[in-house]
Amino acid sequence: MSSERSISIAKRPKVRKRKFYVIGPDYRVGGKPGFRLEDDNILPQGHYHLPPFDEPPRFVFDKRAGDLPHDLESYYGFWLVSDRTKVVLETVDPKGFSFVLCDVRIPSGVYDGSGYWFCDVLRVLDALDEAKSRLKIGIRDDDRYRDFGKKFYDFSGGAELVFREDAVGDAHVFRMAHHASNIICDGGLKDACKSAGLKRLRFRDVSSL
């Protein structure tokens, strides 16, 4: 009499692939900004990194002129972030950012709200898997651009981006080497921002831009 012995083989759980997003302010909300630098000339033109300031950048917040800043705003291509946004960003990726505290004033009285900071994303990675991505790649032939004569990525008409995990490593945020105006974050930073209840941030899945 024969008997059969069944052997069960435990399957390894599938490793979830890390997701990436373009992170930035949510422009879909609309509205007119009620905040401005007293002197816009202190910001460099055509650059993505903050300069050393002789003194704290001085902002005027005026709700009569428009909306006061939320947790993350764009100002001349740079980020302006609240105290609590700064805490989340530097907790998740302390090497990814630098911050400059701003001096906030209001038309009358003394400002007693959240502190605000200029935020710079320091890390630049050449991490795009071009063979697996869908986008336009060209050489910049317009000398008005700072990357004139260099390779650049074009997302017009839509794009699907795939990043090489070995090139990203343990980074949670970075600028793209050939599209530095776009800031990429992973799901870890996105989840931390959501958990903290940060307002007016938008995360666009890079697999469908």
Image (cartoon, helix red, strand yellow):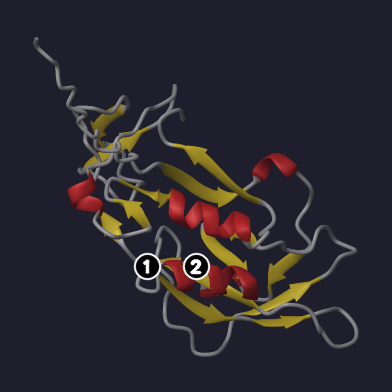
For the point 75% across and 57% down, the residue is 33
Snapshot quadrant of residue 67: bottom right
The earlier-in-sequence mark between 2 and 1 is 2
Instruction: Work out whether residue 75 can be spotted.
Output: no
Q: Is residue 151 above or below residue 82?
A: above
Residue type at mark 1 is Gly
Marks 2,1: beta carbons within 8 A: yes
Q: Which residue is mark 1?
A: 96
- Which one is nearer the viewer's eye here, 191 or 145? 191
Instruction: Name the quarter where the N terminus is drawn.
Output: top left
Residue 144 location, x and y as percent? 36, 46
For the point 39% across and 27% down, the residue is 159
Q: CA distance from mark 2 to mark 1?
A: 8 Å
For the point 27% across and 41% down, the residue is 163
Q: Secondary structure at mark 1?
A: loop
Residue type at mark 2 is Leu
Q: Is residue 116 above or below residue 152?
A: below
Instruction: Work out whether residue 107 can be spotted.
Output: yes
- The circle drawn on residue 89 is 2
